[in-house]
Each structure stands twice: as C-alpha cells, then as structure tokens.
Amino acid sequence: MKITVVGSGYVGLVTGTCLAEMGNHVLCLDVDPVKIATLQQGGIPIYEPGLEDMVKRNAAAGRLSFTTDVAESVAFGEIQFIAVGTPPDEDGSADLQYVLAAARNIALHMSEPKVVVDKSTVPVGTADKVKAQMAATLAERGVDIAFSVVSNPEFLKEGAAIDDFMRPDRIVLGVEDERAIELMRRLYAPFHRNHDRILVMDVRSAELTKYAANAMLATRISFMNELANLAESLGADIEQVRLGMGSDPRIGYHFLYPGAGYGGSCFPKDVKALVASGREQGHAMRVLNAVEEANEAQKRRLVDKLVKRFGEDLGGRHFALWGLAFKPNTDDMREASSRVIVAELTRRGATVAAFDPVAAVEAQRVMGDNPSLSFAPDMISALHGADALLIVTEWKMFRTPDFDAIKASLKQPVILDGRNMYDPAWLRELGFDYQAIGR
Ligand SMILES: NC(=O)c1ccc[n+]([C@@H]2O[C@H](COP(=O)([O-])OP(=O)(O)OC[C@H]3O[C@@H](n4cnc5c(N)ncnc54)[C@H](O)[C@@H]3O)[C@@H](O)[C@H]2O)c1
C-alpha cells in the first residue's frame, strides 16, 4: 500500500518506518525542515532503540522517504495518517490546531478519495472536527471527493516503540464505513498474524480508549507514590507491599513502581486533557485531579528529602544527578521530573552536575540556559565534590555501579534514589546514607 504519515516525530516516524518494514511504501511529511533534512541524509532526529537501522534499511530499499512538500505527500498515500502533536492548551485541553491544519492540508490538495487516520491522541469528537474541517475545505474548493476518517490511537511506549508497534497488544480502530475497515484490516494484518488483535469500535469509544488507558496507568503510579510516602512514615517497605499487592491477579505487578513522579509527552498532558473533557461535560473527574496533584508533589519529593537533610538554603551545596530523561531508553525530556528537581535545587542556591547516557543533548537544549547546571561526560565524574547523588532515571547502567568509586568521589556518602534501584540494607552496610522512595 502507499501510505503518507503527517508528522515525523516519535509516533509518526515509528509508524511510518514499521509500515515500510512490512513492505508498504511510505512517505513521511513534516513541517520542520531540519528534521526532514536530517532524515533525508540518513540520520534520525530522536533517540529510539533500533529505529535508526530500520529507517536506513527501508530508505535504502526505496520504501521510505521524507518530504516537507504537502502537495506531494497528499498525492502519495491512499491512507493519510495524522501523527502530529496535541500539546496542552492553556486550560489543559488538547490543542488541536496541528491536527486540524493537517486535515485542511489534505483536503486542500486531494484529487482522489482518501482514508484519513487520526493516530495522534485526540479528545472525543476530534474525528468529527477533522471531518467537518475537510468537508468545509473541499466545499471552498468547489469539489466533491469522498473521504473517511478513522480513529486509530497509538499505544507504543518510547524506548520500546518498535517492538510495541510490530507486536501490538491491541489495534484499536474507531471506524464507521466498511471500505475503511477493510483497508485498515489489510494494512495491519501482518502485525498480528498469531491471532486477531484488532478491536473495531465506534469512533468516540476509540478516542476515549486512549485517554482511559493512559489515565489508568497514571492513576496506578500516583496511587503507589502516595502509598510509598505513607509507608515511609509508618516504617513499612513499599517494595514488600508491592509484591504482596501485585500477586493478586486482579491487581497484577505492572505499573506499581513508586518513584520521583511520572513525566513524558503523554501521561501529564493526557490526564490534563481528560480532566478538561470532563469539565466541558460537567463531570468533575475527582480521581484524575488528585492523580495530577499527587504527581506534581511527587516530582518534588527528592528535593523535600534533600531539604530535610541539608536545610532550606542550599547555597554553596553541590549535587550530582544521574538521569535526565523522563524514563530510560529515550532522550525525551518533556515534563521530565529532572527539570523540576534541577530548577528547584538551583533556585535554592545549589549547583548541579548531571549525567544522562542519551538525553544530555536534549537536556542542554531545554535547560542549558541555567548557569548552575553542568553536564558531566560520565557517571563517575558527575560525582566529584558533590554533597549527595540524586538518581532520577532508572537507566540500566546505574543498576550495578562501582559503589567504592561513588563513595570516593562524593564529598559525603549520601544517595537519594528516586527510582528504588538498590537494596537499602546493603547500601547502609556499604556506609551510605541511602534514602529511596517508600522504603
Ligand atoms: N510519544 C509517545 O510516546 C506517544 C505515544 C502514543 C501517542 N502519542 C501521541 O501521538 C501524537 C504525536 O506525538 P509525538 O510524541 O510523536 O510528537 P512529536 O512532537 O515528536 O512529533 C510531532 C511532529 O509533527 C510535526 N507537525 C506539526 N504540525 C504538522 C503539520 N501540519 N504537518 C506536518 N507535520 C507537522 C512536528 O513538526 C513534529 O515533528 C501526540 O498526539 C501524542 O499524544 C505519543
């Protein structure tokens, strides 16, 4: 099939590349000429394990190409995926300007029927808005060309995006016309040869499913964070509690890890957008408001612990920070807890030396103007002369570090672990003042 993907970010690029890997011909469009030039020259603008090789392989085979030319991209694909950003507006609702601009562009240039697929995470009712935008644009042009709008929310996880796309748990299709259902089934058939994973439903339910899934995951995290904070006060170990809870199959072990708060491009904005949808419909969404509030507080949890240890005024203190990305295996810094922590520490007068194996370049872009923040070339040199080490992202390379070297480099053997990486008893035995979350 010939497919166009509008928006070549994390989701668009992975979608386009995986569809090309299955033999389709894919053209990825973006408005960002730097991104497209990088891709055309064989580079990739983001870090995602395995993606660069797959992009190169499919580009070399002539199945994957990149453009900034809207007319070319509209003419190319019978299926037009929309995978542009849907950032939060001022009131927390999803800003649909990029989605609607993409829809308008398609309608402005199309000369034959198209199936338009919303892959961006969009609130209920967006497919109707896309439809109305396209109908109005076609009417302006004085032409009558058939099109369908499908909702196909994406569930991939950054850091494991290729695997998630190639072996999806489910493929949700919100679609109302038979021809589009048939086409989408054919497109996705190679991705679920083992058994059918397609869930066809009405468009509104498909749109809501994506928010429901992310909001549920965020709720589990905030719930565990609150429980962890309580466990600390009560002298219980949240790790033991997690095992005791998770063994109940109704609860399960997944996503019960307390930490320094959730971040990323999805959970924070999707929780806000669902709260905003609730507000518009007269529903207070009390649970999700609390999820959000608890997460904001949790991002400051490590700083609270530091303040308890070193006092309110951190002037003259220097701290090492391991992990900047919002989670391992990505360079994504959107809403990362590290941003809140660095801002708060430096506001209190401290300096911070940070290390991240992948996200340092992106962190430099978003936080580089903070003169109290420096970037270390490796994990040990970040520690020199620091009053404490803070761990914010659970990269694998932090799992079994050289604790002798850590002790020798730090001014004081203090570790504040926002991701519960180590055994507290062992760290105490090694002579560290070790504080984790809920232990
Ligand atoms: N990142 C994730 O893990 C993830 C997972 C599932 C769903 N989503 C959803 O997918 C959508 C995209 O997310 P992302 O992380 O890929 O965003 P992103 O910011 O990485 O990429 C979006 C891209 O769209 C481009 N763009 C904007 N307007 C355009 C237009 N009119 N024409 C062509 N290109 C345009 C931007 O330049 C950018 O490169 C969002 O709605 C997000 O919520 C993201």
Image (cartoon, helix red, strand yellow):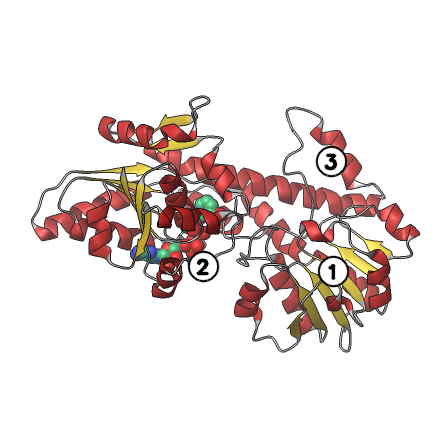
Give the CA separation, mark 2 to mark 1: 29 Å
Give the CA separation, mark 1 to mark 3: 23 Å
The answer to whether one can see residue 408 in this image is yes
Residue density around tag 1, few if under 14, some if 14–19, many if 20 or more, within 10 Å: many
Image vertical order of residue 304 relative to residue 113, above or below: below
- Which x, y percent locates residue 116? 27, 41
Q: Secondary structure at mark 2?
A: loop
Which callout, 3 or 2, points at the residue further toward the start of the chain?
2
Image vertical order of residue 257 relative to residue 48, above or below: above
Q: Of 369 and 5, which appears nearest the observer?
A: 5
Q: Secondary structure at mark 3?
A: helix
Which callout, 1 or 3, points at the residue further toward the start of the chain?
3
Decide if residue 307 is on the left or right side of residue 363.
Answer: right
Image vertical order of residue 234 relative to residue 88, above or below: above
Q: Of 371 and 276, which appears nearest the observer?
A: 371
Identify the residue under disc 2. Answer: 45
Identify the residue under disc 1. Answer: 390
Numbered circle sitting on residue 242:
3
Which callout, 2 or 1, points at the residue further toward the start of the chain?
2
Q: Amino acid at mark 1?
A: Leu
The quarter in which the N terminus is drawn is top left
The answer to whether one can see residue 274 in this image is no
Residue density around tag 3, few if under 14, some if 14–19, many if 20 or more, within 10 Å: some
Query: Who's the residue at 24% across and 44% down the image?
Result: 77
Looking at this rendering, what residue extends furthest in the front direction? Answer: 60
Mark 2 beta carbon near ligand 1 (under 8 Å): yes
Query: Who's the residue at 57% across and 49% down the image?
Result: 292
Query: Who's the residue at 76% across and 77% down the image?
Result: 315
Residue density around tag 2, few if under 14, some if 14–19, many if 20 or more, within 10 Å: some
